[in-house]
Amino acid sequence: MGLWIFLIILIYSFLKTTGEYETATRLSLIIIPLYSAIMMILGIGQNFTPLTMLVTLLLILVGIEIGLFQTRNVKLKISNEKDKLGLPKVKIKRGWYYLLGWIIIFIIGILVELFYGAEMDKTELSEKLIIEILRDISSIVMFTNKSSWFIWVLNVSSSWTYDTYLFLEYPKLRQYVVLRQRN
């Protein structure tokens, strides 16, 4: 029962943050995608087979599509708040398309795991959902939690697509996060 209550609280928190403006950071838009890419390469290297490569290619294509889908209706604003360098903070509101893309990635991850022979009950599924939500809202969990190679593939392809689109579409975001220049 406690697991379900915790899951409901996490889902509420996750839904709430998806609809709110959050400060854009190097950690979320650059460092985590780079870390994910490294973990993806290491994970594929440990599970290298022709089937793994075929699944990886398919997941990359699906992840790119999901990343583009997640950019729909993203909103960006320049805040009156200043960061530690005195620059106005750039804030992003991810929106419902981001959330729906996240759900699709989670479902695909479960399906790939089942394809590779995993078995899971409701409790294991709930635990996986908790971990994935925590990975999205906590960088500590992202860096300390072990994931399957295919989760890293989906994460890399969707997040790199999402981030690249945002950087190209919003030069002020790129200036703030990548170049650290005044707007």
Image: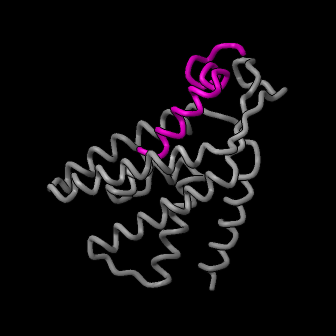
| In the rendered image, the vertical position of residue 96 relative to residue 8, given as above or below | above
Q: Is residue 97 left or right of residue 152?
A: right
- How has the structure been colored for display? one colour
Q: Nearest the camera: 169 or 29?
A: 169
Residue ranking furthest to the left: 49
Residue ranking furthest to the right: 80
- What is the quadrant of the C terminus in the image? top right
Does the magenta portion include 164? yes
Q: Is residue 17 left or right of residue 43?
A: right
Q: Quadrant of residue 49?
A: bottom left
| In the rendered image, the vertical position of residue 20 relative to residue 103, given as above or below | above
Does the magenta portion include 165? yes
Q: How many marks?
A: 0
Magenta span: chief secondary structure: helix
Q: Is residue 77 left or right of residue 128?
A: right
Q: Nearest the camera: 143 or 89?
A: 89
Q: Quadrant of residue 169?
A: top right
The residue under the point 32% across, 53% down is 58
The residue under the point 65% across, 65% down is 10
The residue under the point 48% across, 59% down is 105
- What is the quadrant of the N terminus in the image? bottom right
Place of residue 177 in the rendered image (x, y in percent of width and height, measured from the top left): 60, 25
Place of residue 156 in the rendered image (x, y in percent of width and height, measured from the top left): 42, 44
The residue under the point 64% across, 73% down is 6
Q: Which region of the structure is painted magenta?
A: 157-183
